[in-house]
Image (cartoon, rainbow, N blue to C red):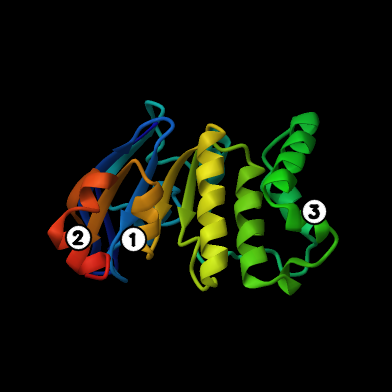
Amino acid sequence: MLVVKDLVVHYGSIMALKGISFDVEKGEIICLIGANGAGKTTTLHSVSAIIKKTSGQVLLEGKDITQAKPYRIVEAGLVQAPEGRRVFANLSVKENLEMGAYTRRDKAGVREDMEMVFAIFPRLKERIHQAGGTLSGGEQQMLAMGRALMASPKLLLLDEPSMGLAPMLVDEIFAVIRRISRNGTTILLVEQNAYKALGIADRGCILETGTIKKSGRAADLMKDAAVIEAYLGG
């Protein structure tokens, strides 16, 4: 589904990504974990072409999207739900979801997907006419994920979906991620909560200062002594 080869990104003179490579197979949940500043969000932003790559290559379903414009990448099926939710505060829940489908012309499909989003997130349907900015943090995260789903992604990039949420809501969000995966969407997940991320992922990559230090099956990483000490609290 996705192949990232030798990706290098600079912020001025600082090398944020130092030639990382990884792949995501169709149907998988892959998680990127690491400390703040490791390069997790930079990886997603560079794959989505939100920020400029210094060098490297990104392939989506075998097609080179390295130089593609962000909206073309969305049209190709790679969609990101950003860190910090970034909902349209003055637009209603319904309008936010409609904005997620702005590249689509299949009106019937858009209506079906909106009902699918409401089935996954019933609270959004309850607040369909409420302004996005007045929702709780958990509801805004649901809205951000729902908006991304409205673009009908083949590959969904989730950036810190549990950030700032109460533990009960964190459990709910991760249950939803599992459900989205079971419905056929491939997921690349960036998450500070390494335990939760590895608990639902098929494979994981450990990022440290712009380099992938370790990767493998999520179940194996959860048993790795160095990963346990650094990221799993013990």
What distance separates the C-alpha of mark 3 from that of mark 2? 40 Å
Q: Which labelled disc corresponds to residue 194?
A: 1
Q: Callout 2: helix, strand or loop?
A: helix
Q: Are marks 1 and 2 in contact (CB under 8 Å)?
A: yes
Relative to residue 215, is residue 9 depicted above or below?
Answer: below
Q: Callout 1: helix, strand or loop?
A: helix
Q: Callout 3: helix, strand or loop?
A: helix
Residue 32 at what x, y percent from top left? 33, 54
Dot placed on the residue nearer the N-terminal end, 1 or 3: 3
Dot placed on the residue nearer the N-terminal end, 1 or 2: 1
Within 10 angstroms of label 3, few (less than 14), some, or many (20 or more) residues? some
Residue 104 at what x, y percent from top left? 70, 36
Q: Which labelled disc corresponds to residue 173?
A: none
| Quadrant location, the N terminus | top left
Q: Is residue 61 left or right of residue 12?
A: right
The residue singled out by tag 3 in the image is 125
Q: How many marks?
A: 3
Q: Which labelled disc corresponds to residue 227?
A: 2
Q: Quadrant of residue 35?
A: bottom left
Amino acid carrying mark 2 in the image? Val
